[in-house]
Image (cartoon, rainbow, N blue to C red):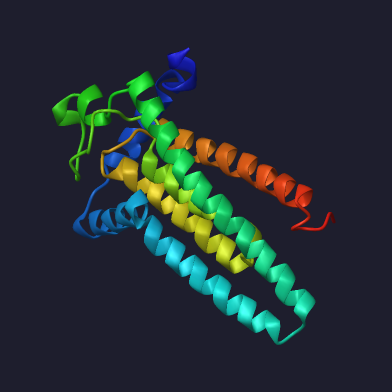
Amino acid sequence: MKSFFYDWGGLNIWLFHAINDVHSVALDAVMKLGSVLGDHECFPLYLLVAVSCAWILVERAQYQSPDRMSVVARAWLMVLVVFCAAYVIDGVVVAWLKQTLSFPRPVIALPPDAIHPVLAPHDRHSLPSGHALFAATVTLSFWPVINRYGRAALVAFMLWVGLSRVSLGAHFPADVIAGYLLAAVVVLLLRFGVAGVTRYLKIIRPG
């Protein structure tokens, strides 16, 4: 089972080496920045930025019409609730999965001379990547209220963070993919759940 879903018949390790073997001072600096921006400790910063954007957009919509302001406010309220709830759930699920599965990080699973670890890992457990999970949570949570240019930027951010974790030697590609998939499941379930609750409470009128 592990050889199929995680090792991918050797492709997981091959992809890891294809990414991790390429290094330069500039590239490492870019990857370190991506890893920092994808850290879950940035949650308060991203939440502050999101609340500020919501406030500005709601104020702007107020000058258009009360109905428009109501639509914008409800949309932003939903994504903020989803983002905060997903952040809490992600933390619990990641901690449980890492302890339960106990897949080793590359620095443990591979010979020392076969890896270029740029950053020291925080722990020994690799699956899933918490950074990739958080970056995908940010991207998917705010997807409904962002225009196409913002969405392109968010996707680039998500991919940058995921790539950085492999480049820095902290995770295998499968760990990153698992983080993306887990974020998608959590955010989508929360979005449907929040939408259902708000419709039931008549906070949001059925479309």
Q: Residue at x 67, y 42 (%)?
A: 193
- Furthest-front residue in this view: 201
37 or 6, which is in the foreground?
37
Expressed as whole percent of the image width and height from the top left, the position of residue 96 reads: 39, 27
Q: Is residue 187 visible?
A: yes
Q: Is residue 140 visible?
A: no
Count the labels in the image.
Answer: 0
Expressed as whole percent of the image width and height from the top left, the position of residue 187 reads: 58, 44
Q: Is residue 167 above or below residue 109?
A: below
Q: Is residue 64 above or below residue 105?
A: below
Q: Residue at x 46, y 52 (%)?
A: 158
- Furthest-bottom residue in this view: 63
171 or 200, which is in the foreground?
200
Q: Which of the image's four quarters has the C terminus?
A: bottom right
91 or 139, which is in the foreground?
91
The image quarter in which residue 109 lies: top left
- Furthest-right residue in this view: 207
The image quarter in which residue 117 lies: top left
Q: Residue at x 58, y 61 (%)?
A: 151
Left or right? Give the position of 104 relative to 187. Answer: left
- Furthest-top residue in this view: 1
120 or 192, which is in the foreground?
192
Expressed as whole percent of the image width and height from the top left, the position of residue 52 reads: 49, 73
Q: Residue at x 32, y 30 (%)?
A: 126
Left or right? Give the position of 20 relative to 54. Answer: left
Q: Is residue 174 above or below residue 71?
A: above
